[in-house]
Amino acid sequence: MAKKPKKGGQGTPATVALENAAVPFTVHAYEHDPAAASYGGEAAEVLGVSAERVFKTLVADVDGALVVGVVPVAGQLDLKALAAAVGGKRAAMADPAAAERSSGYVRGGISPLGQRRPLRTVVDDSALGHATVYVSAGRRGLEVELAPADLVTLTGARTAPIGR
């Protein structure tokens, strides 16, 4: 059963998208430390979750088009693998301002769900090995836990080995 975000302004486009899709999810809020070296690493540590289950959302430029890569915070995005997964040749990390404009979220809080402009999305296939995974709920200090199959369905993603 879907758990609604707690009162106090925690609703985001990501949680609204999940509610509208009527998929089970849980919102996890924590106090974000602006000095944290890694947003995803901080989330895993504070929430007491294995870093292999917490996924970061990265926006890359593949042959001139923005593409979303969702990979475990414990690793890195393999840009060559991401490009190959969407039939592209060359990939580089997107300009942070372009990623924020396209998604409607701030860096460190970009969610693969509820983006302003939906982009082609690739989720690292390691997500499928977990009952649930965590992704940003659209704000620093706010994560959403859901089944990886629901994440793939709601983002229209394909899965591929894009993490390393």
Image (cartoon, helix red, strand yellow):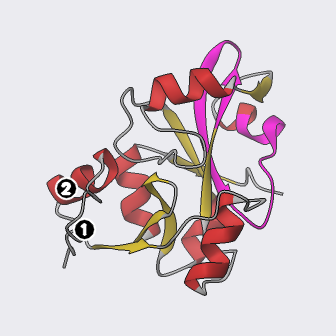
Where residue 73 appears, x then y in whole percent? 71, 63
Numbered circle sitting on residue 5:
1
| Residue 115 visible | yes
Where residue 107 appears, x then y in whole percent? 59, 40
The residue indicated by pointer 2 is 21
Q: Measuring 28% from the left and 56% from the top, which residue is drawn there?
A: 15
Q: Nearer the viewer, residue 10 or 52?
A: 10
Residues packed near mark 1 inside 10 Å, few (<14), some (14 to 19) or many (20 plus): some
Residue 32 sits inside the magenta stretch: no
- Mark 1 is on which residue type? Pro
- Mark 2 is on which residue type? Ala
| Residue 87 visible | no
Where residue 137 appears, x then y in whole percent? 41, 57
Discs 2, 1 touching: Cβ within 8 Å: no
Where residue 110 appears, x then y in whole percent? 52, 44
The stretch in magenta equals 59-82
* Disc 2, SS: helix
Q: Measuring 63% from the left and 61% from the top, which residue is drawn there?
A: 125
